[in-house]
Image: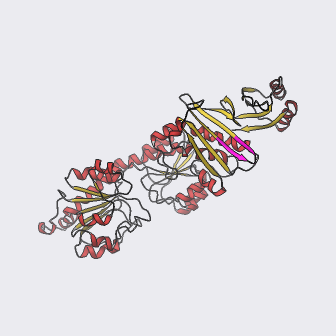
Amino acid sequence: MKILVAEKIASAGIRLLEEAGNSVDVKLGLSPEELVDCIPYYEALIVRSATKATREVIEAGTRLKIIGRAGVGVDNVDVVAATERGVIVCNAPTSNVVSAAEQTMALLLAGARRTPQANASMQNAQWDRAAFTGNELYQKTLAIFGLGRIGGLVADRARSFEMKLIGYDPYCSPERAANLGVTLFDDIDDILPQADFITVHLPKTKETIGMFGAEQYARMKDGVYLVNTARGGIYDLEAMVPFLKNGKIAGAAVDVFATEPCTDSPIHGLPTVILTPHLGASTVEAQARAGVQIAEYVLLGLQNKMVPTAVNVDLVPEVVMSAVAPYIEGCETLGVMLAQLSREAISNVELKVLGELANYDVGLLGTAALRGIFSQNSDDPVNLVNANYIAEQRGVTISIIKDPRRYEYASKVSLSTQQGSQRIEIGCTASGPDGVTRIVSVFDYKLDLIPKKYILVLKYEDTPGKLGRIGTVLGNANINISTMEIGMLDEATGEAVVLMNVDDPVPNDVFRELCNVVGVTDGWFVEL
């Protein structure tokens, strides 16, 4: 496939993409108009922070399957537009965590010891030790807002300076906070008066933008130092100015800005401020990791596999993924078959999960089933990213029923829909180390068939000679039956269901002849 790399990434990442057999074009510095013009030719787009993957770009990218951001955030990608189009958006969130944590510590130390200001003084041929008396980190209180990967690494490093650690993160468990040596608070107002240093490691959301303004600065301890290597806008810089000038805030070190590049801001030029041009991820090691990681994830997306860092697909814990992964393909197959067995529009779907699999979160299997259903009646690409969105738009509901008891199989999933008085059902299990899909029920008739590309499904009254007639009709049409399974008889009606894999499509005239000669009461030709 064709991959467009719009910003510089590590050469190791480029090699990884090319060694997988893809064509990679590196085009740096594209204007928005140039990106829109060339994106229709590519299945994947890789960016960093400067290139904007806007709705216009995404809608022009009719072949796009995945957009990879070689870094942590995805602020420069229109995730909503990508989701609507079924384009995976992923990032490399762990590539720069060490670099960002080290940058935080560098700024904490530089702010406390006024190192950049002292350097500037020396470069101007001055020697003024008294002007740059600083503060130790030792036994000072550091407040960490956000205890995710980077915040946790900052806590680890701050402990080595014997700092007292307090923190705020509504999503951090008490156990994790305890392991990090952080005393957790539920209310930021309780933290602010205690902290000698404050560092933020929060995502950019409606709740966090402007989280610290004049009201919060006024509650802070006199002489506090502030650091931001996370996202621009968390500190209100304009509101910070008077507090920096009167010394309430002893210093601020800012690496990120609401709009970048930023060469002017309310705190530019203030003597107690340290400004750096978004250097959190700017290490040789982080750039190499980001390039390789995003290449790995883009390859997964192009292979229609789950991408661990996809931001527009619900992330699935590893233990859950290992359990449900063998059934993803099976549920998609069930969806394809259900759509072709249904003679009316599907408005309701029931996914039933039986056995050991029912002990896990199986929401991803419902998404896979919807993907299979909509792949039969949508001109737009349908995948695990946008299947639920399409269902919502079309008014299709899916319910999931779980029963952990074991029946015929260790685990089984079935998909069904009710259309008038008829219930259409099909079920499968996964077998062997490779999780091979086996169809084990159709219309609640029990059987066992590994599905191939072309499948005949026939319901008929079971009497001697019927299978022979089926074979004769197909043989006369030069259509080979590769495998076949007969469902258990319905004792009340004497009706049977047969599933058979055939090597070629069954033309309409041959299908009609089957129905007439065999006495088929209902039948379908399914193509996977």
Q: Is residue 420 magenta?
A: yes
For this view, does 421 lie left or right of residue 509? left
- For residue 476, above or below residue 298: above
Please tell me in which quadrant of the rendered image residue 126 appears: bottom left
Q: Indicate the quadrant containing the N terminus: top left, top right, bottom left or bottom right.
A: top right
Secondary structure that dominates the magenta span: strand
For this view, does 106 lie left or right of residue 485? left
Residue 511 in percent (x, y) is at 82, 35
Q: Nearer the viewer, residue 85 or 118?
A: 85
Residue 323 in percent (x, y) is at 50, 37
The residue segment tinted magenta is: 415-424
Please tell me in which quadrant of the rendered image residue 453 appears: top right
* Residue located at (39% from left, 46% from top): 289
- For residue 380, above or below residue 268: above
Q: Nearer the viewer, residue 319 or 481?
A: 319
- For residue 26, above or below residue 492: below
Q: Nearer the viewer, residue 464 or 220?
A: 464
Q: Residue furthest front?
A: 492
* Residue located at (71% from left, 46% from top): 418
Residue 320 in percent (x, y) is at 48, 41
Q: Is residue 202 magenta?
A: no
Q: Nearer the viewer, residue 422 or 91?
A: 422
For this view, does 491 lie left or right of residue 209? right
Q: Indicate the quadrant containing the C terminus: top left, top right, bottom left or bottom right.
A: top right
* Colour mode of the rendering: secondary structure
For this view, does 286 lie left or right of residue 77? left
